[in-house]
Image (cartoon, helix red, strand yellow):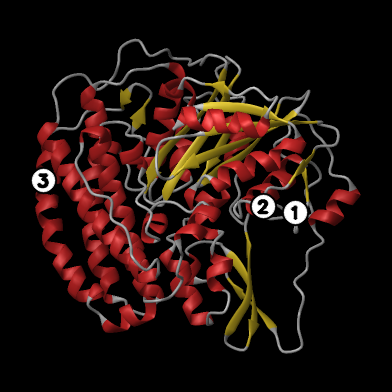
Amino acid sequence: MVEITKRELGAVLKAIPIGEADYRERGYHLFAEVGAADLLSAARFFDERGFYLSAIICVDHVEHLELVYIFSNHASLCKVKVSLKLDPAKPVAPTISTVFDCAYWHEREIREFFGVTFDGHPNMTYLFLHDGIDSYPLRKEKIPVSDEDKRALDSFRPGEGEDTFFVNLGPQHPSTHGVLRVVLKMDGEYIEEAEPVLGYLHRMHEKMAENRSYQQFLPNTGRMDYLGAMSFNLGYVTAVERLCGIAVPDRANYVRVILTELNRLSSHLLWLGAYLADLGALTPFLFVFDDREQINDILEPVTGSRLTYCYFRFGGLYNDVDDAFIAGTRAFIERMRSRFSLYDKLVGGNVIFTNRTRGIGVIVKERARKQAVSGPVLRGAGIAMDIRKMEPYAAYGEMDFEIPVGTRGDALDMYHVRIREMENAVNIIEQALVRLPEGPIMTEKVPKKLKPPKGDLYHTVETPRGELGIYIVSDESDKPYRMKWRVPSFSNLMIFPELAKGNMLADAVAILGSLDLVIPEIDR
């Protein structure tokens, strides 16, 4: 497929050379540097061939800004990097939001953090920041925000019709599970528009990465998706290991899978309890927290934490699992299998729950691709894509599991997919325990100061909420020159305005909950 894409892409871009990269080292197969005039043609090429836009990244090289577009495919492993260089004094690029809807949100983020103007974008206003910002935070040098830029960024005001009014869903509302604010334009009980307002928890993790060594940044990963911290921790260490060429012992890889799947179970359980509470059912909340506490009791002695895990290390693990951990995990597996029938009766067979979620928040396959949703939301929409299967990491390539998908793409399908993913997690943990090899948990001679070779890498893993993409630019120092986190909750949230439109306010809560958002991950 890569060869076909290279030939076809070359025909579209004509004089622009298409390069081949070592996928194991770079995380993409092909790359091309285009001019502004060719960017839209390249975007349309990938759109017509069923690709999705995984991420847009901006890198400040001081002498120029570089926009990096990562195009990926749901059907097979094929990633392409397209880059565009911009004048740092007046960075302007054409919008591709007319081709890929998710670009609408990525371009707004880049505009406020780097000062890039995207020609043709319908709403270049603040998304995370506010009009008190006096410079672009992710530029290497302090570049002041001009008065003209401030007016442009802060110019959007929702229009009010004769019979409409506005409701704030959040930033302090139980169903937002964090300080998320959505401005709803209402016509009676029905939603006309929904505008997410982010940034209440913004902590500039990407800027912090530029000022910390690779080792020093490790604890930050668990502070983004605090419910799926193990997946974020694993994503980061495997990205850096890939960049540095660090091998990991087999035992460490199997332990990584076991702990990550226990954390996936814990995350899905919390989602289930909180989602039902949003809809008015409090009893399941007590059951799922009972199960979740059992997982925490297993993980705490090994990791030293019950939430924001930082257990994995470059080259292996912080410490080994013992017989008590293995016995406790096996006992939990047996217990958890008996709980699925309980949840099926309590939730899946509950007529009130099914009536509240069936036919609500329907996502069709094409919209899922255009908005680049991922994880259970993507699979609920009927697309069988799981990074653990498509691009196995750690010991996932040795595990046998099915990819559950929905048939309607509604909120009820999102529930069924996550329940089946919990069953998968139990099966994966059991397989990993049976095959757990003896041996070391750390590779020998990992340098105390990591200085990866010069270059870049785009690395993905499957978190409880979907595709986590980590883009690292190395300048051969012990600190990342640039680190971009493509987080799944951000992309999954951005389909909400489309899903909410035309629905009642009560249904908006059911739709929002079905997306399983973690707000610190979005704000990162």
Residue 331: percent from left, percent from top: 9, 49
Which residue lies under the disc numbered 1?
121
Q: Nearer the viewer, mark 3 or mark 1?
A: 1
Tell whether 149 sits left or right of 185.
right
Which residue lies under the disc numbered 2?
97
Please give the label number shown on residue 330. 3
Provide the secondary structure element on which disc 2 rests. Answer: loop
Q: Are marks 1 and 2 in contact (CB under 8 Å)?
A: yes
Q: Does the rendering let one see residue 171?
A: no
Q: Along the line of sight, which residue is nearer the eye, 53 or 494?
A: 53
Task: Give the alpha-carbon distance from disc 3 to disc 2, as whole Å.
Answer: 48 Å
Residue type beneath disc 2: Ser
At label 3, counting other C-alpha atoms closer than 10 Å, the crowd grade (few under 14, some 14-19, many 20 or more) is some
Residue sitting at 43 percent across and 75 percent down? 360
Residue type beneath disc 3: Arg
Residue type beneath disc 1: His
Residue 166: percent from left, percent from top: 67, 79
Task: Give the alpha-carbon distance from disc 3 to disc 1, as whole Å.
Answer: 53 Å
Task: Give the alpha-carbon distance from disc 1 to disc 2, as whole Å.
Answer: 7 Å
Tell whether 277 sits left or right of 500.
left
Residue sitting at 53 percent across and 59 percent down? 493
Residue 355: percent from left, percent from top: 34, 82
